[in-house]
Image: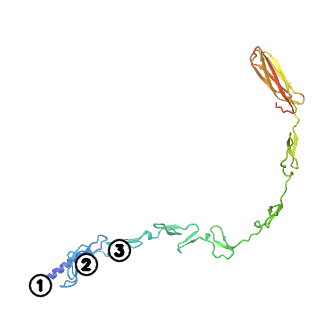
C-alpha cells in the first residue's frame, strides 16, 4: 500500500509538471511579433528524484510564483528568440521584445539617386548628390574626382617650354616658347638724341628719330602782333603777319525840311541827299497851332533810288488849327538801303 501511495504521488506530481510544460509549450508553439510574455520559475536540480522539474512558474520577468527552495535555481522562460538587440553607431531600430529590426541611419547612408557623373557629398545633415563643377570631372567607374583635361596644365613640359591650349574644351600641351623680335614689337632701351623726337618705328623695331621742327609764320599766324590804332585785321600774310587796313573814309550829313498844312490837309517833305550819298534813316517832328485834327503818319521811308527820304502826315479828324512837319534824314556815303 505504501508503494502504491508513493507511486500515486509521483504520478500526480508528474502530471502537474506536464500541465505546466504544456502551458509553457503553448507559449513556445509560436513566436509572436510583439507583447511576448516572460515567465519565471524554479528548476529542481537534485534530491528526492525530482530533478529537472520546474515549479512555481509565474508570468513575471523576475519573480516566481513561490520562492525557490533548496536544490532549486531560478529560471526565466519566454516565447521569443532574442533577449535584446541594441542598434549601434550608424544603425537605427533594435529592441528587447518580439520581432525587432535594424536599419542604416540616413546620416550614414549614401544616396541611391545620384545620376551618372554625380558623386555623394556630406551636406551638413545628410549625404546628397553633387555634380562635378566647372573644370572638374567625375569618374563613377573608377570612383575618382579630378580636374578636367581642358582645365589641367600638362605636367611633362621640358624646361623652357610653355603650356599651349589646343582650343576650347581641349587639352593643353607643351610647346616651345615663341621668340619675339623687333618685327613684332618696338625694341626696348631706345631713345632719341637731344632735340629729337620719335617719328615712327621701322620693321626691325628700331625707333626713327627726327630733329624737332621749328614752326614759323608760314605754318601759323604769329602771336603778339597787332594793327595800329584805327586799323583792323583784314587777313594773314604768308609770313604769318596780320594784314591791317584803315576804316573806309565815310562821309555823312543831315538834311532837313519842313511843311505846314491846315485842317483836313496832308503835309509832306522829300529829304534829298547830295550826289554820292544815300539816305539811311529818317524821322520827323510835329508842332501844332489851334486845335488841329489828330495827325497820322502814313509815309516814312526812303525813295526807290535810296538817295532821298520821304515823310508825309495827314489829319485823321478835322480840326481848326495847323500842323507843322519838320523832317530829317541822315545821308551816308556808301550807305546800304533796303527798299
**Drawn side of residue 106 relative to residue 275, left or right:** left
| x 26%, y 77%: residue | 76
| Residue at (16% x, 81% y) in the render | 11
Where residue 279 sits: x, y (%)?
A: 84, 29
Q: Which residue is mark 2?
A: 75
Coordinates of residue 138 in the picture (x, y in percent)? 55, 71
- Viewer-closest of 54 and 282: 282
**Number of other residues with Cα within 10 Å of mark 1, as a class: few under 14, some 14 to 19, many 20 or more:** few
Please give left or right for residue 177 compared with residue 77 in the image: right
Measured Cα–Cα span from mark 3 to mark 1: 52 Å
Q: Would residue 167 appear left or right of 17 to someone viewing this image?
A: right
- Please give left or right for residue 104 compared with residue 314 in the image: left
- Residue, x 56% and y 70% (percent of image)? 137
Which residue, given by chain and number where applicable, does mark 1 sit on? 4
For the N terminus, the image quarter is bottom left
Q: Residue at coordinates 78% horizontally, 23% vertically from top-left? A: 298
Residue position for label 3: 85
Lower position in the chain sequence, tag 2 or tag 3:
2
Amino acid at each position: 500500500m505504501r508503494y502504491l501511495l508513493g507511486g500515486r504521488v509521483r504520478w500526480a506530481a508528474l502530471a502537474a509538471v506536464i500541465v505546466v510544460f504544456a502551458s509553457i509549450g503553448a507559449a513556445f508553439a509560436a513566436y509572436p511579433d510583439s507583447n511576448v510574455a516572460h515567465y519565471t520559475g524554479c528548476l529542481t536540480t537534485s534530491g528526492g528524484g525530482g530533478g529537472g522539474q520546474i515549479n512555481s512558474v509565474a508570468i513575471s520577468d523576475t519573480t516566481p510564483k513561490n520562492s525557490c527552495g533548496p536544490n532549486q535555481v531560478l529560471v526565466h522562460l519566454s516565447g521569443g528568440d532574442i533577449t535584446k538587440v541594441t542598434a549601434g553607431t550608424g544603425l537605427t531600430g533594435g529592441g528587447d521584445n518580439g520581432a525587432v529590426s535594424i536599419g542604416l541611419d540616413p546620416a550614414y547612408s549614401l544616396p541611391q539617386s545620384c545620376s551618372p557623373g554625380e558623386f555623394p557629398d556630406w551636406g551638413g545633415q545628410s549625404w546628397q548628390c553633387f555634380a562635378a563643377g566647372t573644370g572638374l570631372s567625375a569618374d563613377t567607374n573608377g570612383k575618382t574626382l579630378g580636374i578636367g583635361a581642358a582645365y589641367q596644365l600638362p605636367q611633362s613640359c621640358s624646361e623652357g617650354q610653355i603650356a599651349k591650349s589646343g582650343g576650347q574644351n581641349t587639352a593643353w600641351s607643351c610647346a616651345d616658347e615663341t621668340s619675339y623680335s623687333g618685327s613684332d614689337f618696338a625694341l626696348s632701351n631706345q631713345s632719341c638724341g637731344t632735340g629729337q623726337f620719335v617719328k615712327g618705328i621701322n620693321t626691325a623695331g628700331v625707333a626713327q628719330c627726327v630733329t624737332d621742327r621749328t614752326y614759323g609764320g608760314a605754318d601759323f599766324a604769329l602771336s603778339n602782333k597787332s594793327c595800329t590804332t584805327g586799323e583792323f585785321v583784314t587777313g594773314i600774310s604768308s609770313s604769318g603777319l596780320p594784314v591791317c587796313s584803315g576804316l573806309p573814309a565815310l562821309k555823312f550829313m543831315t538834311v532837313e525840311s519842313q511843311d505846314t498844312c491846315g485842317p483836313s490837309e496832308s503835309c509832306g517833305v522829300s529829304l534829298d541827299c547830295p550826289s554820292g550819298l544815300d539816305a539811311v534813316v529818317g524821322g520827323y517832328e510835329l508842332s501844332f497851332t489851334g486845335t488841329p485834327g489828330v495827325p497820322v503818319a502814313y509815309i516814312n521811308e526812303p525813295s526807290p533810288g535810296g538817295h532821298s527820304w520821304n515823310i508825309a502826315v495827314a489829319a485823321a479828324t478835322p480840326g481848326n488849327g495847323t500842323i507843322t512837319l519838320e523832317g530829317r534824314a541822315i545821308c551816308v556815303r556808301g550807305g546800304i538801303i533796303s527798299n
